[in-house]
Amino acid sequence: MGFTLLVAFKAESQNIETYKYTASEVVTIHSRVLNEDRKVYIHCPKLDSSDENKRFPVLYLMDGENHFELLSQYADYLSRADVAAIPKIIVVGIPNTKRVRDLTPTQSISNYDGKTDTTGRYKLSGGNEIFLQFLKTELIPLIDSSYKTQEYKVFAGHSFGGISSINCMLTHPNMFNGYIAISPSFWWDNEYLLKLTEKRIKAGSTLNKTLFYCNGNEGGSNSFFHKALLKFDSIITAKKLMELDYQYKYYPNEIHMTVPIVAYLDALRFIFKK
Amino acid sequence: MGFTLLVAFKAESQNIETYKYTASEVVTIHSRVLNEDRKVYIHCPKLDSSDENKRFPVLYLMDGENHFELLSQYADYLSRADVAAIPKIIVVGIPNTKRVRDLTPTQSISNYDGKTDTTGRYKLSGGNEIFLQFLKTELIPLIDSSYKTQEYKVFAGHSFGGISSINCMLTHPNMFNGYIAISPSFWWDNEYLLKLTEKRIKAGSTLNKTLFYCNGNEGGSNSFFHKALLKFDSIITAKKLMELDYQYKYYPNEIHMTVPIVAYLDALRFIFKK
């Protein structure tokens, strides 16, 4: 007799149906840029008759396999009529195929402490520009042609996804209107992105964006994570940019894997505040 | 030609599947106690081979139509192997049929300010004892016989659900091990439950429970909501109870409908801390 992992015995209950979540979709597209098939998860808001002619902002979310359900849930709850903290939005979750390849801006095998990584895990690093090309020339056009999207778009990520979001803001400033970077791995390649931020953003210039960045307790307030975020925050603040709406938050009670839970909630409310 | 509310145009995309959430169930049972059919939503954890012989604690959640998806999402994420903030749990969401009837402990038509309510909305109030009987004699036995449950059970609610949770702790102290009361409506019936707490709980006695209660910004720090929570907290603290593990949290940046989002996250981690 085979063993089954079911939680339910289902011996007696008669009237059992499947719970109906607001349906989300999995769309598979072939990316010529990446030369592979990619799945994306799409969560659309529940509509009512007042939404007839409306179009919706889109949140593009990296690490879709980790945070798509959480963000979909927040998007639904925060846009309820009796909460009304954010407008209805479309969430596009992008699960990884080769995470290190897609979500790092440079080829590097240095660890966070500057020492050479010998595990081979960073061998394929440095493909973020190609990944951003996939978004720009394939994914975003497909979403815009298939769903009732507004032009307003946000790019959100955690850890390596966080540096991808910042890298995109610096290198393709016209792709998105808002950026969320949760505990970005600024240590990558000897703080490559902090240097790029210093170099690419001109003091006193206009950067018509909304930007949320944060970190949790990733080794305490003396950790490289925390210090790098403070450094990024100083650079942004010192630049005295025009029309940039930004917020830095520190979550000392959250670890690296729980900071997305509280930070995405704050980030959605900051980025999409009415 | 009929108008459709679809967010998607679906003109071109070819490979579209439905996103597969971890399946939750809707079980319909006939309650003799309440003399009506009741639906309950059940979310079971994702299992792996190490869970073969395990049984799971159960969270019974009032206002299932509002917070079941959020709590299911938190339960899944917080129990991931790389987060490991809480154990895997079963979430049982109880959507309302007649909310005021089921979730108020006494028959009253007084408003929060003590004035008589003339809208008729509290006409059916006072059925919480019958609702608790439904849980005790029908719902909990069904869940225990149909799913791989542990004995450890938690009762959670918001607003009227919050006073139902506290009322259950006071009047049926053996039904649950943990209680969550998010912004409980202690104003109900001239602070009936604060008086009952004072009366029922004996100073210095043993109350082997875990208890989380909180409020948000429901009219500021001088509001009846906030003052009632402080009063409840003083009563509990002054009783110097043995074996009671309790926490009071105040969320001044959250309104009545957003406090559940942050508070349930903290509550799950407090109640199920490892």
Image: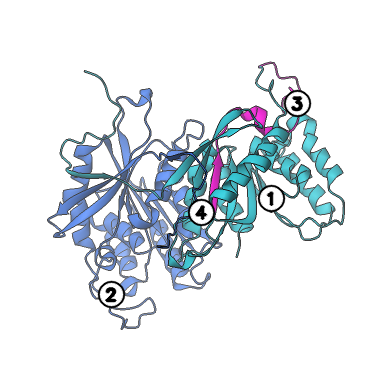
Chain colours: A cyan, B blue
Any magenta on residue A116? yes
The answer to whether residue A223 shows anywhere in this view is no
Q: Decide: marks 2, 1 in contact (CB < 8 A)? A: no
Mark 2 or 1: in front is 1
Quarter that holds the N terminus of chain B: bottom left
Which subunit holds the residue at mark 2? B
**Compared to B168, does A60 lie above or below?**
above
Q: Residue beneath label 1, please?
A: A176
Q: Which residue range is magenta in the image?
A: A90-119
Q: Amino acid at mark 1?
A: Phe
Residue B122's label in the rendered image is 2
From mark 2 to mark 1, how far is it between C-alphas?
Answer: 49 Å
Name the element at disc 4: helix
Residue A75's label in the rendered image is 4
Q: Residue at x 38, y 48 (%)?
A: A21
Mark 4 or 1: in front is 1
Which subunit holds the residue at mark 1? A
Name the element at disc 1: loop
Instruction: Classify mark 4: residues with Cα within 10 Å, few (<14), some (14-19) or many (20+).
Output: many
The answer to whether dots 2 and 1 both sit on one chain is no
